[in-house]
Amino acid sequence: MKIPFVDLKSQYESIKPEMDNAINRIISNTAFIGGNEVSEFEENFSKKYGVKHCISVGNGTDSLYIIMKMLGIGNGDEVITPANSWISSSETISQAGANPVFVDIEPEYYTMDPDKLESLINENTKAIMPVHLYGQMCDMDHIMAIAKKHNLFVIEDCAQSHFSEFNNQRAGLIGIAGSFSFYPGKNLGAYGDAGAIITNDDELAEKCRMYARHGALVKHEHKMEGINSRLDGIQAAVLNVKLKHILKWTDDRINNASKYDLHLRDIEEIRIPKIRPNTKHSFHLYVIRAEKRDKLADFLNENGIQTSVHYPTILPLLPAYNHLGFSEKDFSNSFEAQNEILSLPLYPELQEEQIKYVAEKICDFFK
């Protein structure tokens, strides 16, 4: 049996008439930049997500950068972000002119450890950037309490947590703003790069929208120098179609994760994902832990099962940050996870027989 890590073709086949009509409409109208589909997506996402403003941008990385720039974060400032994440979380801090400060993760949930935050805060700290990794939200009550105490912005990186919840609040609605990626493999994915900023802050929303469009809300009326980061019409059309299905797809992901739990829970050599109390884990990724991770991944691949590692090297230990002089001892939880985590295939279209096959092969490996 062949099981891809992500099966975007199956998803496309399930909505083919809707998707083809939407893309053909954009081509026929030649509405490639801006246009009704883009404004409709912003409105549709705002309504479905329950937020006042949605500002579409070119990609999720841009959204983080734009938020920080429009909050006035820059030279000499520091922003705290977790050690275990994709490099967008830290490189955008540097691009804004600030310095990334890394914090270790909680060993069970893989998100930033709030208990280790306060020791990293000083007079240069301007923001905390929690990353809701794998679809699991951070302990936002604890993080927000610390941020309030020290008068810090909280910018939520929601690239992997579309429609995740913590205490009945969705990812991105708790801090000053939320950043989303709609990269094709995300829970809500375009057919190319795409992203968005959400916020309930009117002033921040206007600044972000202006900055992402060359510093102008009206063409040729540039109130500031900005950048070019726009969602194109075809990607907006794709997202408008998928947005109609996202809540069901999220439920399907959660159901498939529970099926994995059922079939894997008795294998003592692995650890299955643990869900934080009072949260809705949207399961962008289903991540297990195993001491023989690399050999297990090779064995699964030999049996037709694609897997991935998110992420094989934690951010502070990447060559890009060698100048900071960190060692594995500085982020012990993150480093331990780095060598054990393995992401299994998970998507709405995954069938139970495929999940059983994956579980059987994992069991065979450890036998």
Image (spheres, rainbow, N blue to C red):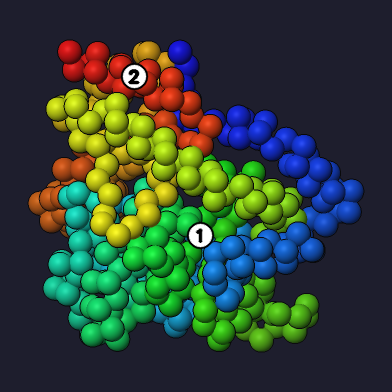
Residue 354 located left or right of residue 331: right
| Residue type indicated by callout 2 | Leu
Residue 267 located left or right of residue 309: left
Q: Position of residue 333 (x, y in %)?
A: 15, 50
Q: Circle 2 is placed at which residue position?
A: 300
Q: Nearer the viewer, residue 172 or 311?
A: 172
Q: Which mark is residue 180?
A: 1
* SS category of the residue bearing label 2: helix
Residue 217 shows in this picture: yes
Q: Earlier in the sequence, mark 1 or mark 2?
A: 1
The answer to which quarter of the image holds residue 258 is top left
| Residue at x 37% of width, y 18% of height | 357
Residue 217 located left or right of residue 331: right
Q: Position of residue 72 (x, y in %)?
A: 44, 83
Q: Nearer the viewer, residue 81 or 316?
A: 81
Crowding around mark 2 (Cα neighbors within 10 Å: few <14, some 14 to 19, many 20+) is many
The answer to which quarter of the image holds residue 170 is bottom left
| Residue at x 48% of width, y 40% of height | 252
